[in-house]
Amino acid sequence: MPLAEQIYLFIMLLTAGMLAGFCYDLYKMTRSKLRLKKTGTFLGDIFFWLFLTCVSFYLLLRLNAGEVRIYVFLGLALGTLLYMQLMGKTTYRLLDGLFSLIGKLIKIIISILLFLWKIITTPFRILFIIVIFPFRLIARFFSFTGRGSKKFARRLVLGPAGRLKAGLLLKLKSIWTKLKPGNKT
């Protein structure tokens, strides 16, 4: 292999090592933000290193016809070391800021969606209270008059009220499923 090709290959391996260092910082930041426990960290480490091994093997096949020489390991290790020394801390802080910004944006979007949900459901809640309140008053009245009248009140008032509530909930559920994103009906 000519010297120019070896230099080109070494530069590509340095770049691959630096990219591996960046991927490690990205994984480390993701792991810390997700607050993975021991099992999650263990599985994440396995998947990360399997992924990195596959990418490195692919690069070796594309760049060097799969030949593994000592300068391949030196190039990858030196590239990772250069990344960690020159750009590692700055990149980690930038990733931390980016992840924090994404987290805040997600919280804002969720709070907006919850606010819209409250706006949409408030008329139904008011209607439910208006319809159910008289039934509850009647049920309380009958509950004071004795045990037999309590059973009568349950059958007379709470039965229809329960069916009304169940019917309203079914209607709301069907409306919700129709409004869900990705629903074709």
Image: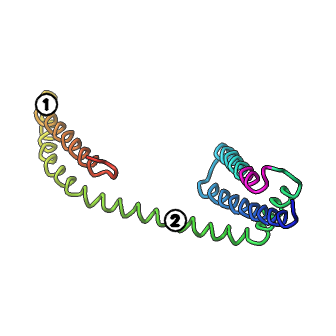
* Residue at x 31%, y 51% (from the top left corner): 180
Assign the N terminus to one quadrant of the image.
bottom right
What's the residue type where badge 2 is placed? Ile
- Which residue occupies the foreground of this view, 132 or 4? 4
Left/right of residue 169 with respect to residue 10 in the rendered view: left
- Residue 181 on image: x %, y %: 33, 52
* Residue at x 84%, y 67% (from the top left corner): 4
What's the residue type where badge 1 is placed? Arg
Q: Is residue 101 above or below residue 156?
A: below
- Which residue occupies the foreground of this view, 67 or 171? 67
Let me know if residue 2 is in the magenta part.
no
- Location of residue 166 (image quadrant): top left
- Residue 33 on image: x %, y %: 60, 58
Left/right of residue 179 with respect to residue 158 in the rendered view: right
Given this view, does label 2 or label 1 mark the residue nearer the observer? 2
The magenta region covers 56-66
**How many numbered circles are shown?**
2
